[in-house]
Amino acid sequence: MQAIVDFQARVASDVILAGGVVAYPTEGVWGLGCDPWNPEAIGRLLEIKQRPVDKGLILIGRSLAQLEPWLAPLTSEQQYQLEQSWPGPNTWVVEHNGRLPDWVTGGRDTVAVRVPGHPLARALCKRAGIPIVSTSANKTGKPSITERLQIILKLADELDWVTPGQVQTPGQASTIRLLESGEVLRP
């Protein structure tokens, strides 16, 4: 099973690093991903989703260590809090260090970050060697996509790659919280 995950991660990461947009399973919904530093890829992803750039995007990584170079310094308590919630469906809004493009942050001083619990999503970040953008694979305002067949039918013509696989807990999007206060933005 691990060899299959590694193979799929290699193919998808190669597509991402070449400027493509891919769909892949996460814990609760299918996600769209691309290279966060590639403005053309981000533009395509936002067009596919019909999402305004000022909303910002989530970055996923294989570990806190992969995300940390773009975050403002964390206290030991904040590091502990993040590490205890990951890997898993917990997205945290964290202050960044100013090195992320506005098309990722939505022009804010914060960025949403997560280390996914889905092995393929984590392997994808490991293989790419960078955090990747992750957003639900649905048009803005439309229901989340939980089945691969739905991706094929609704979005395949707009994507460069759709990995095989399935979500772990269909329909359960990640919880989003502010790291500073712990306030829940999306239960």
Image (cartoon, rainbow, N blue to C red):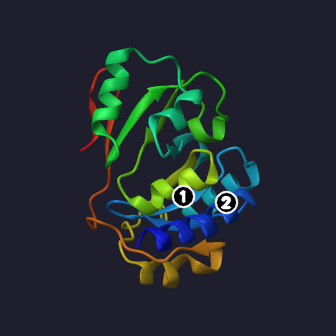
Residue at image x 71%, y 57%? 17
Q: Secondary structure at mark 1?
A: helix
**Toward which corner of the image does residue 7 lie, by quadrant?**
bottom right
Give the x, y percent position of residue 39: 74, 48
Q: In the figure, is residue 147 to the left or right of 71?
A: left
Distance between the alpha carbons at the discs numbered 2 and 1 = 9 Å
Q: Is residue 159 above or below residue 82?
A: below
Residue at image x 54%, y 58%? 124
Residue at image x 59%, y 21%? 97
Mark 2, residue position: 16
Mark yes or no: residue 138 visible.
no
Three-letter code for the amino acid on which mark 1 is drawn: Leu
Three-letter code for the amino acid on which mark 2 is drawn: Ile
Q: Which quadrant of the figure contains the N terminus?
A: bottom left
Q: Is residue 163 above or below residue 17?
A: below
**80 or 90, nearer to the observer:** 80
Q: How dense is the environment of label 1, judged by Cα within 10 Å: few (below 14), some, or many (20 and up)?
A: many
Q: Contact (CB < 8 A) between labels 2 and 1?
A: yes
Give the x, y percent position of residue 115: 42, 45
Mark yes or no: residue 30 visible.
yes
**Toward which corner of the image does residue 77 lie, by quadrant?**
top left
Q: Secondary structure at mark 2?
A: helix
Q: In the figure, is residue 47 to the left or right of 149?
A: right
Q: How dense is the environment of label 2, judged by Cα within 10 Å: few (below 14), some, or many (20 and up)?
A: many
Which disc, if any, is residue 124? 1
**Toward which corner of the image does residue 26 lie, by quadrant?**
bottom left
Q: In the figure, is residue 109 to the left or right of 173?
A: right
Residue depth check, mark 2 versus mark 1: number of the one nearer the observer: 1
Q: Earlier in the sequence, mark 2 or mark 1?
A: 2
Figure label count? 2
